[in-house]
Image: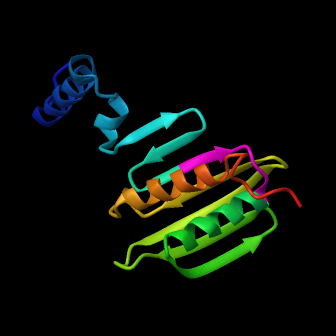
Amino acid sequence: MSLSPRRAVLVALAMVAAALPACTGLEFSAVSAGATMAESGDSVLRRGKAQAFEPVQFDDCVAATRRVADQFCLTLLREKNSDGWAYFRYRDDRGLILLVTVERRTKTVSVIATDVGFFGNPGLANLFMAHVHEGLRPERAAPPS
């Protein structure tokens, strides 16, 4: 079986990419996708996006989202709520758009996700998520009503 020059180059590049993790410790998914990713059980961070499962009720997660946005002085561009789902679109002073979604998974589990887009700076999304998570800690959460 004969390989065309183009196919041979592609095979060689694939073999090099597959060998890189063994040499450098890089994850193959990061090499092949060209994106950064960190995962730790209940949260996932990708270039421009962050997602976390929180063991809290939906309303508490939405309230924490609003508190952090107020604390960061973000401008609310749009808010949309439906049963068990909330969407927020914020802008910072430099024009970066931050999308935040909160989804009810069960009575006591919610998912919060942030997105600044592939070309946006993920720092704000990660900082936002960290502050929401910190605000949801039992000793800092709002008392039950």
**Picture coordinates of residue 82 (x, y %)?**
78, 71
Q: Quadrant of the C terminus?
A: bottom right
Q: Report the number of discs.
A: 0
The image quadrant of residue 16 is top left
Q: Kindly identify the residue that appears in the image at 68 percent across and 52 percent down.
A: 140
- Quadrant housing the N terminus: top left
Residue closest to the eye, 37 or 124: 124
Q: Relative to residue 93, is residue 26 drawn left or right?
A: left
Residue 131 image-quadrant placement: bottom right
Position above or below: 95 against 137: below
Task: Please name the residue shown 42% across and 76% down the image.
Answer: 92
Q: Residue furthest right?
A: 145
Magenta residues (range)? 51-58
x, y percent for residue 121? 34, 61
Side of 40 where 65 appears, left or right: right
As drawn, is 24 to the left or to the right of 87? left
- Indicate the quadrant where residue 59 lies: bottom right
Residue 74 drawn above or below residue 83: below
* Residue at 49%, 76% in the rendered image: 73
Report if residue 43 lies within the magenta region: no
Residue in the foreground of this view, choosing between 90 and 128 = 128
Residue extending furthest toward the left: 5
| Color style of the picture | rainbow
Residue 26 shown left or right of residue 102 in the figure = left
Q: Position of residue 54 (x, y in %)?
A: 68, 46
Question: Is 56 one of the magenta-colored residues?
Answer: yes
